Amino acid sequence: MSKLKSIDEIAEKFSDNQVIMIGGFLAVGTPETLVDALVTKGVRNLTVIGNDTSFPDRGIGRLIMSRQIKKAIVSHIGTNKETGRQMTAGEIEVELVPQGTLAERVRSGGAGLGGFLTPTGVGTVVAEGKQVITVNGCTYLLELPLKADIALLKAWKADKSGNLVYRRAARNFNPLMAMAADLVIVEAEEIVEVGELNPDEVVTPGTLVDMILKA
Amino acid sequence: MSDMRERIVKRVARFFKDGDLVNLGIGMPTMVANFIPSDINVMLQSENGFIGLGPSPEAGKEDKDTVNAGGIPVTIVPGGACFDSSMSFALIRGGHVDATVLGALEVDEKGNLANWIVPGKLVPGMGGAMDLVVGAKKVIIAMEHTTKEGAPKILKNCTLPLTAVNVVDYIVTELGVMEVTEEGIVLRELAPGVTAEEIQSKTEARLVIPAHVEIMQ
């Protein structure tokens, strides 16, 4: 069965209350067409996991403006003032996670790990409510994995079996999220035939990808 | 750039050694890149996913996928390498980054740093700062010595929520260079025309002042 799908076929998979990972860093490497589909369908009460809430008119920022997010798990909200306003007003929940910890929580989710120990956040508010574990005299926080119902990813090139190649800084969280969600949907700038990508250049193996959309 | 800021970033750039991998924070730290001595090779990491951060592109030559961690278009120098966010922060936490330069709201005499939140006022999130200061081998704070209102930022104890505990190595301001040690904050260099009395009067923490203090170049 072909993984190439129309935007309507993809939008059928979206529903209220889902946990959705969205690739990108300040919207670089964010699948804007897939975000469009989320906005158009108007699903609500989403938990969104991503690096940041971007800008009001780009990427995850648009889901903040359209008030479709119940909870955001991100490392930074400073470029979208509306996120801070909704958080302060108690309209949404924002879990701020150090960027390296966020990346590793997603990686752990996709790698079958029960969590990991990191020195980041020891002695700060990030440590509140977490197990503190000492190993060989060093203090760490136990951080738990993140998983999602759906991952929305952006690739530079995809072949029709879902093998993905990323470009420059647009890679960021995308390969990690490809491992950590039940349904993996990719928007690619260019779609090529199977066999056209050099296997040494493939970053995300096609078996992880369920649906592909041409950007 | 003001003379004050230029003095700070020029001095910070002299901390680096040939072959260092360095991560520069957003704002004044970013400007350090313009003053790295030409006789050493320093590679810059951009935590959004590459090593080899280069200068701004010419107008019209911007690449949508090549931006720094502030989202600003940049270039990647020959010899650069791209990777995902997990690898990027493994480089940082794993001690592979030789130095990081960041701004600060407050630093204290135990090397504690507060630079990510002012509760009730400014809640941008920590981004990569917590990982950077915990993981980088050398943490250099580049900042103006006092707040805009003239209040000290180098304190006995930080009052704002911390970014990390006991991580700061050096503080560079327009008045001088200080090193955080077990014995407290040691004054290493004074800017031309600045006295030890003046820098202490603008610092809440007690400065340890050795017999010989260099002139900040």
Image (tube, coloured by chain):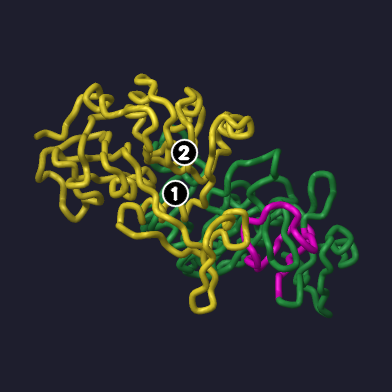
Chain colours: A yellow, B green
What is the number of the mark on residue A26?
2
What quarter of the picture does the N terminus of chain A occupy?
top left
Residue A96 or A92: which is nearer the viewer? A92
Q: Which range of residues does the magenta coloring cover?
A: B154-181
Q: Identify the residue at horizontal 39%, vertical 53% (top origin).
A: A145
**Above or below, B31 relative to A212:** below
Provide residue A99's location: percent of width, then percent of height: 49, 51
Provide residue A15's location: percent of width, then percent of height: 33, 27
Dot 1 falls on which chain? B
Provide residue B129's location: percent of width, then percent of height: 56, 54
Q: Identify the residue at horizontal 71%, vertical 77% (top origin).
A: B182
Can I make out residue B42 in this image?
Answer: no
Dot 2 falls on which chain? A
Can I make out residue A83 in this image?
Answer: yes
Helix, strand or loop status at disc 2: loop
Q: Is residue B27 left or right of residue A162?
A: right
Marks 2 and 1 in Cβ contact (< 8 Å): yes
Q: Mark 1, residues whose alpha carbon is within 10 Å: few (<14), some, or many (≥20)?
A: many
The amino acid at mark 1 is Asn
Q: Main secondary structure of the magenta part?
A: loop
Q: Identify the residue at horizontal 42%, vertical 32% (top origin).
A: A46
List the residue tagged with mark 1.
B48
Name which quarter of the figure residue B108 lies in.
Answer: bottom right
Helix, strand or loop status at disc 1: loop
Provide residue B125's location: percent of width, then percent of height: 58, 45
Name which quarter of the figure residue B157 lies in.
Answer: bottom right
Q: Identify the residue at horizontal 48%, vertical 57% (top origin).
A: B44
